[in-house]
Amino acid sequence: MVRLDKRAADAIVWLLLLTAPFWMQWIGGYTELGSRVLVMALAAMSVNFLLGFTGVLSFGHAAYFGLGAYGCAMTIKYLVPSTPLGMVIGIIVGTAGAAIIGALIVHLRGIYFAMVTIAFGQVFYFITFRWNDVTGGDDGLTDWSRMPLDFGFAKLDILHNAEAFYYVILFFFAVALALMALLLRSPFGRTLLAIRENERRARFLGIPVDRHIWLSFVISCAFASLAGTLYALLNNFVDPRALRWDLSGTFVIMAVLGGMRSFWGPLVGAVIFVVLQDYVSSETENWESFIGLFFVLIVLFFPRGVLGMIRRKAAP
Amino acid sequence: MTQLILFNVFNGLIVGAFYALMALGLSLILNLSGVINFAHGGFLAIGGYIAYVLIPFIGFWGALLVAPFLTAFIGLIVERVLIRRLYGRDPLYSLLLTFGLAYIIEDGTRFIWGAQSMPYQVPDWLMQPLSVEYFFLTGYRVFMVLLVGVAVAGLFLILTRTRLGMRIRAGTLDLETVSVLGVNVRLLRNLNFGLGIYLAGLAGVLAAGMLGLQPVIGTSLIMPSFVTIIVGGLGSLPGTLLGGLLIGVASGVTTVFFPSATEAVIYVMMGLVLLVRPRGLLGEEGRF
């Protein structure tokens, strides 16, 4: 197999994403499905920032994803009907939650860390589930919708124009990815890789490991809550399932399926997972069994993920 | 008011006993094999449904005896076929695999028996209140607490008095050395997994009589079991027992004063414990 130049691969990915609304119909997709792929991919990439590039397994990212979603939805519904403000507040809420929880758990490692993130993920689930008056409880938060974007000189109606909203999501997706790539290339990002490869050695070199892991956790959750705000806007609706543990598992499996060690891996995983879920859940009521089976098969036969396997084959 | 508080404390004690029973099984598997068994709640549900199927034929007492063993047997097979391959790999993989299993089991039980709660026959005389004054004290509830106590005592006897238990404890400390000393580690892990699943199955048979038998019964108990382990201290079985009772009673008492925080309170407790003692109440420094 010919190895693609890295830059060429990047260009192809962006080209495909930019033109997606035009070719999706031909293969049986629809624009909203594309938007969903982008949102899920962003969430999976945020998980991968921790999992793939810091070597820390968080199994509770749905909590911060959901906090972002609720922060955004509640701002638009109760405070100011403004999409950008909703997003800003959503991200602040999600990141603040992560900063507090992160401080509690940052000195734990390995499975212990994973278990505590799973358990803490549930706090926010129960709060939104039980606090009926404000969050709408199990029925979710309805009666609000994303607002047109007002640039001063022009208005963009993202509510009725699915393509326009796809490009808005793509814009934020691109900004987030650029930031992530920049961070990973910076000395900070290199330090995270060092921690992933050998934590003890990193510590001996005088790197404040706990502080780096905390920062990485908070940054990763900030991206997750950005994805959450977009998710709420995309559905014009949010319910407690947006922050339940099964969604956390979905993020992780998307990252693993695509390939944890590669930057584009989670996007590939998200494409496969979201399209498959869309297809299976329209065909059968027992789609949960299929998803479960999917998890088992990936772990047994594709532990390196799609990109990991391609890369391994390409290497001499 | 006193009666209300007493009722909820006792109720919390029962629920806590379930958390502990489940968490003990989880801990056994986690300590020896480093696997977070997300499907533990699923095995609990399987235990309940097996008992449900068996009760018409062999009665409640027969099912109570047989169902946990059948559940453990399924656990042995699952370990043999699926989980064994993942030992020594990143714990991420076993977590994802059991996560998928949990999905399959929940959906599978829903497919076979439906989503609604199943009628579950418990002997009538057990359902009678023990006293007129304390109406809540049905025999079944007291019986459950007693049985959980017996199970926990039995587990600790197995762990401290039998050869298998000794090897499990030794393996928890240093599996490599145990292996070098000639113990069949694969078998040890297999049996240990079965022992953990047995406890889940037992909890399932008992819980079905109180919480109602439905596919989500396991899912609703798995998260508190994680909290139980974390509060009690990873690696410490007495800690797990203590943690279960503690969070059970805490959520019971919270139900009286602040009902909407019943679930959230245990996570607040977990946060507090982690703040003061990052290793959990009885956890040892340096493990995990």
Image (spheres, coloured by chain):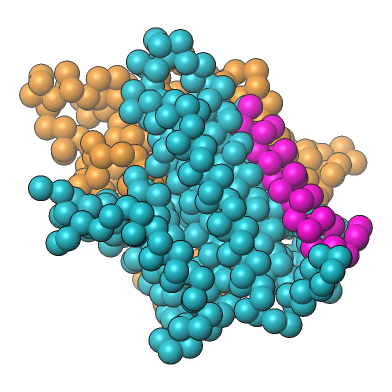
Chain colours: A cyan, B orange
Seen in the image, is B77 located left or right of residue B47? left
Left or right of B256? Residue B186 is left
**Residue placed most toward the observer, A163 or B244:** A163
| B96 relative to A19 in the view: left or right | left
Q: Is residue A24 above or below residue A205?
A: below
- At a point 56% along the width and 45% down the height, the residue shown is A179
Q: Quadrant of the C terminus of chain B?
A: top left
- Magenta stretch: dominant secondary structure: helix
Residue B52, position as x, y percentages in the image: 44, 67
Position of residue B180 measured from the top left corner of the image (x, y, whole percent):
10, 21
Residue nearest the observer in this picture, A74 or B75? A74
| Residue B22 against residue A167 in the figure, above or below | above
Please name whichever residue, B4 or B44, is drawn nearer the observer in this view of the structure.
Answer: B44
What residue sits 52% from the left and 74% below the top? A34
| Part of the protein shown in magenta | A75-103
Assess whether residue A94 is covered by the magenta stretch.
Answer: yes
Q: What residue do we see at 17% from left, 18% from top? A: B177
